[in-house]
Amino acid sequence: MLPILVFVGLAANAQDLQSLRASLMQYQFNALPLNPAYAGRLEATSFEAYYYGSFASQQQVSRSAMVSLHGRGGASQQLGWGGVFQFHNQEFYNELNIRPAFSRIIRLPKGNFSFGGTLGISYFDVDETVISSLNSSFLSMDGGVGAFYHNQRSFIGVSVLSFFEKTFLSGDDNSGSLPRSRPINLHMGSLFRLNDELYLKPTMLLRYASVYGIPEQNSMTDYSLWSADVHASVFVEGTYVIGLLAGYTKPEQGYDQTRLGLSATLLFGNFRLGYAIQYNNQAASSVSLPASHTISAGYDFFDDPAEGRRVF
């Protein structure tokens, strides 16, 4: 689930702010590890870390970080375990999420299928001098489910995140709310051999999300948005990956957005290091969207994977 923007009257209304946050976060990168069925996709422990930032004025700066750790256990290595830790920082707002996940892995003749669930907790810290209608801190609990199929050449995954959310320790004097998204994500991708040195890896994310408000979920009028993102990358000589990003968001309220970007990843054995930059456009509005970037790193803790090395 994407982290949220605070409901304040800075440069746009609440719908525009939520859409602005979505355009900044490059969620084609961070939504896949949030699928609880992603836990255990490899037969050994894997680590991933992401940092998101934007090139903007101080009031618009949005920084986020995510760390995920996944692995397998149990009899015959058919149980997946994992978790995601997220942190978001803005000038007047902080959010901390911890979401452990567990999955059941079913081995099929041509791949593995898993289904899983997560139950997470979030901590919100709001600057009362900016948003006086909210307490300075409160907590919430939410849940998610997902399914994931993959083999050495392709994958497809679907997740329903924050299908419920319950806030607590928020006090009785709250009159404001924070916009929050409840997404349904569909990821898919495959790998195609072009020649002995080049492999094409196209991936896609289709996303539908409803937006509501917390702590009181009836304090905002719900609306929805859908998005499509494509990331086409090429493996060159098995040592680095270069890619193109393109995306489009259509909110029920607010303005349509488009985004274009470039990505590059270096592969050092089991270790990978990547960078991506993305340019965002909301032509129909007067809001100028800053460019955003992502720094990523990952490591797989095995020497010779029995199921074959994957690139997803």
Image (spheres, rainbow, N blue to C red):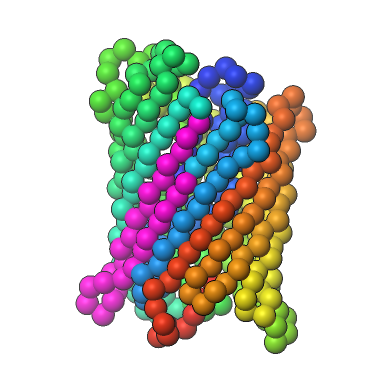
- Residue range of the region highlighted in magenta in the rendering: 65-90
With respect to residue 78, does 37 lie above or below? Answer: above
In x, y percent, where is residue 213? 44, 27
- The answer to which quarter of the image holds residue 18 is top right
With respect to residue 309, does 262 lie above or below? Answer: above
In x, y percent, where is residue 79? 28, 69
Is residue 256 something that shows in the picture?
no
- The answer to which quarter of the image holds residue 291 is top right
In x, y percent, where is residue 103? 32, 63
Q: Residue at x 74, y 24 (%)?
A: 286
Is residue 177 something that shows in the picture?
yes
In x, y percent, where is residue 67? 42, 53
Q: Is residue 127 left or right of residue 225?
A: left
Q: Residue at x 59, y 48 (%)?
A: 26
Q: Main secondary structure of the magenta part?
A: strand
Q: Residue furthest left?
A: 75
Q: In this view, does 79 lie to the left or right of 309?
A: left
Q: Is residue 5 left or right of residue 99?
A: right
